[in-house]
Image (spheres, rainbow, N blue to C red):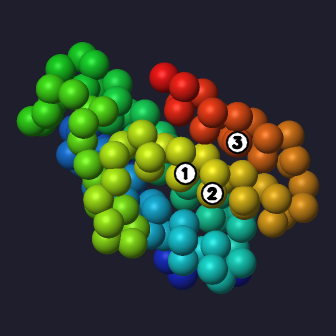
Amino acid sequence: RECPAVVRETKPNTIEACLLTANKYLKEASVCFKERFFWTSGLKYSGALTCLDEAHTLSRVGGIGSSSSSISSVRVGNHLGEAQPLRELRCSCHLNLAACFLQRARDYQLAVHHSSQVLDILKD
């Protein structure tokens, strides 16, 4: 059985598209988590992180479609409709991934890894 919130996407190629896709993944992941589809939820949080990393990379090379000179100042509407700095979104994704691994009652090392990633992000 597959989580009903799953939507297939192509890889975004602009900062704005990356952020929009990340938000879609966050919404889907939240629904899947609530429905106890922890594996699918984890995949969606990973997808959101990939999009956020891609947005960061695009901003560093003067990304296509970039209207902002600094990705760290970008505020993104999260899956709850609140604006969050990109850094906070990345932290949220890592913590939610850790929760997925803990809920699956396995891969504790991956839960620790994602929790540690948050500390790394916050110290920068």
Residue 87, above or below 3? above
The residue under label 1 is which amino acid type?
Cys
- Asked whether the beta carbons under mark 3 and mark 2 sit within 8 Å of each other, the answer is no
The residue under label 3 is which amino acid type?
Ser
Among numbered discs 3 and 1, the one appearing first in the sequence = 1
Residue 9 in picture, x, y percent from top left: 38, 57
Residue 35, above or below 40? below
- Asked whether the beta carbons under mark 2 and mark 1 sit within 8 Å of each other, the answer is yes
Residue identified by numbered label 1: 93
Asked where in the image residue 96 lies, by quadrant, the reply is bottom right
Q: CA distance from mark 3 to mark 1?
A: 10 Å
Density class for disc 3 (Cα within 10 Å; few <14, some 14-19, many ≥20) is some
Density class for disc 2 (Cα within 10 Å; few <14, some 14-19, many ≥20) is many
Residue 90 in picture, x, y percent from top left: 48, 44
Residue 13, above or below 107? above
| Residue 100 visible somewhere in the drawing | yes
The residue tagged with tag 2: helix, strand or loop? helix
Residue identified by numbered label 2: 96
Residue in the image at 64% along x and 73% along y: 33
Residue 46 in picture, x, y percent from top left: 57, 48
The residue under label 2 is which amino acid type?
Asn
The residue tagged with tag 3: helix, strand or loop? helix
